[in-house]
Image (cartoon, grey):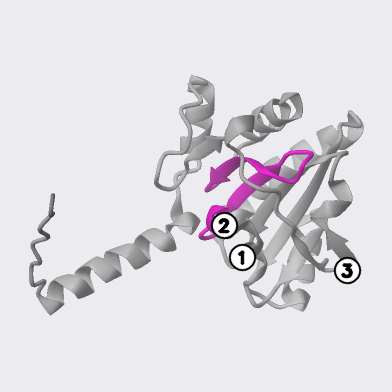
Amino acid sequence: MTRHITRYAVPRRSVVVVASAFALLTIGGCSSDPNSIAEQAKRGDQKGYIAGNGAIEQIPVSKRLKPITLVGTTLDGTNWSSTSARGKDIVVINLWGSWCPPCITEIPDLEKVWTEVQAAKKPVQFMGIDFRESPERGRAFVSTQKMTYPSLSDESGVLILAFGRQAPTSPPSTLILDREGRVAARASGVVSAATLRGLIDDVLKS
């Protein structure tokens, strides 16, 4: 059976409008509603990824993709690879930039959970990715914000390519790797301490 595809001419102006709308959606991470993730977490329905800013995704073990390998240099000059946690710890990866206001909003919550998991000696590592800015600027920001978890420097913006089709589109974004190095959970937009705790505990149990 032959299928016929009808092609329609699209006015050039319409193409420009669509492209502009897509661009706005792509950079929208830095203007997301900080309450949307928390509200989804409170519902606890775990429906999976919902397109748009402020969405959360919990990926069942059977549907997780291949392990990713994230390699880079931290802002203090230390070489790091996500494979160092393989088989031992889960890894919370947070994409941020000092130029992104919502990123600044979520830092206290990230820092709070980081402090908690350390105190409880949970098998959890935190690693930030300082996205598209110089290491010097990143280090100054870390000092000002009193961030105690490490961050990789990603001035060129290429480190997120390690995630393949699961790569975050813009900061703030948080991804959690299970002990095998697979993406097990994601939060697009500002993440609250309560939501992050829940995602971490679920991945630890999986």
Crowding at dot 2, Cα within 10 Å, few <14 / some 14-19 / many 20+, comes out as: some
Up the image or down, 78 lies above or below 204; here it is: below
Residue 101, position as x, y percentages in the image: 55, 59
Residue matched to label 3: 76
Question: In terms of sequence position, does the residue under pointer 3 or pointer 1 come before the other?
Answer: 3
Q: Secondary structure at mark 1?
A: helix
> Which residues make up the magenta segment?
165-190
Q: Residue at x 53, y 32 (%)?
A: 38
Real-space Cα separation, disc 3 to disc 1, in angstroms? 22 Å
Q: Secondary structure at mark 3?
A: loop
Real-space Cα separation, disc 2 to disc 1, in angstroms? 6 Å
- Residue 44 among those drawn in magenta: no
Residue matched to label 1: 161
Residue 136, position as x, y percentages in the image: 77, 77
Residue 147, position as x, y percentages in the image: 79, 54
- Residue 166 among those drawn in magenta: yes
Real-space Cα separation, disc 3 to disc 2, in angstroms? 24 Å
Residue matched to label 2: 167
